[in-house]
Amino acid sequence: MTTPRILVLATGGTIAGQAGDAMRADYRPGQIGIETYLEQASVLGIAAEFTGRQIANIGSEDIDASIWSRLHAEIDLAMRDDSVDAVIVTHGTDTAEETAFLLDLTLPSNKPVVLVGAMRPADAVGYDGMRNFANAARVAGNAEAAGRGVLVVMGDRVHSARDVRKAETRATEAFRGFPRESVGIVTPSRLDWFGAPWRLDDAASLRFLPLPEVPILAIYAGMSAAAASRQLSDDSAGIVVSGVGEGNMPDPVRQVLVQHARRGALVVRASRTDQGLVDPVPDDVEDGFVAARALGPPKARVLTALLVANGISDPAKAQRYFDER
Ligand code: SIN
């Protein structure tokens, strides 16, 4: 087997973070540059050839359209470059699920693309970033990782971008998947897939285009129509509802959203619960709403914005993209 050539695109996050003192509780993400990081990783003896490129060095709460655009362009190029076998993106964990899903929807799956992060900064006791990186390299270097879309490797698990979410603020096993908890289990020395690759047609679902602003409306008990209206502008092309239970909302709020759907906004009902399906109901047809199915509000927002950018605002057509697995 030949040594895999892996392009590492660094964006910052805790995996590149430092506190300056192992005993400190606070730290700054995005402190270590990719060259230094790869030099440190070289002592692990990972069987791969790495090339590093710094895309950003930020906390992932500051990820923005220009960083997404650069990441997408670099990976798209790598997909067609015979000198690159796979791509690893180092990323803050806070918004890793959104970046992973955006890339998943807009890139082909002919080579492995793996996002990896850490929950503890590089100089913390029990830094998890090197283990996660070694795991990510094992996944990226495995030919069977292609055809599974963008993958997120954290805490010895391989998650698919569509399923994964950050579910805890501090634990090193902070990520969960729904409906598939994970698609593989990995350590630096071994990788086991649960099932075969599923993205066999190799095509991206949607074109990567500048994304419109799509707000998430957080529903709560007793929310009034006025409170909902104050948070929504009349020109947003899409709205994601972080509804209660199965994407529900008080009736006065529903009526506000129906008005937005009638003016052409793509209105998507998701759930504020931890996980579960929000399925279409008969009223959705009349209201002009779409059901987010297994996607939680942050990822429903990414898909809604991308659909609008691609000119897909018809609820029935949009629903198909939420139904996909
Ligand atoms: C971030 O998302 O950049 C900070 C938190 C982390 O990486 O775990």
Image: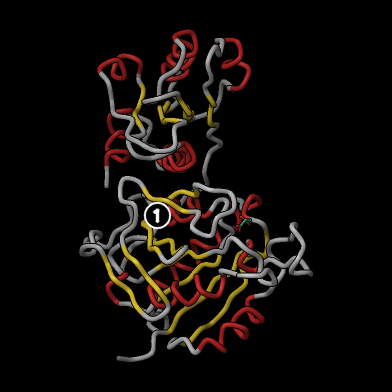
The residue positioned 36% from the left and 25% from the top of the image is: 246
The residue positioned 68% from the left and 60% from the top of the image is: 58
Residue indicated by mark 1:
161
Residue 108 sits above or below residue 187 on the image:
above
Name the image colouring. secondary structure
- Left or right, 94 with respect to 30, comes to left
The answer to which of 238 and 15 lies nearer the viewer is 15
Which three-letter amino acid code belongs to the residue tagged 1? Ala
Residue 73 sits above or below residue 323 on the image:
below
The answer to which of 251 and 194 lies nearer the viewer is 194
Q: Position of residue 63 (x, y in %)?
A: 61, 53
- Left or right, 74 with respect to 246, comes to right
Q: Position of residue 3 (x, y in %)?
A: 38, 90
Q: Position of residue 171 (x, y in %)?
A: 55, 55
Q: Is residue 95 visible?
A: yes
- Left or right, 215 with respect to 4, comes to right
Quadrant where ligand 1 appears: bottom right
Q: Position of residue 112 (x, y in %)?
A: 37, 70
- Left or right, 219 with respect to 113, comes to right
The residue positioned 39% from the left and 62% from the top of the image is: 151
Kindly tell me whether mark 1's CB lies below 8 Å from ligand 1.
Answer: no
Judging from the image, what secondary structure is the residue with disc 1 in? Answer: loop
The answer to which of 101 and 201 lies nearer the viewer is 101
How many numbered badges does the structure rendering display? 1
Residue 59 sits above or below residue 319 on the image:
below
The residue positioned 65% from the left and 68% from the top of the image is: 16
Q: Is residue 80 visible?
A: no
How packed is label 1: few (under 14 Cα within 10 Å), some, or many (20 or more)? many
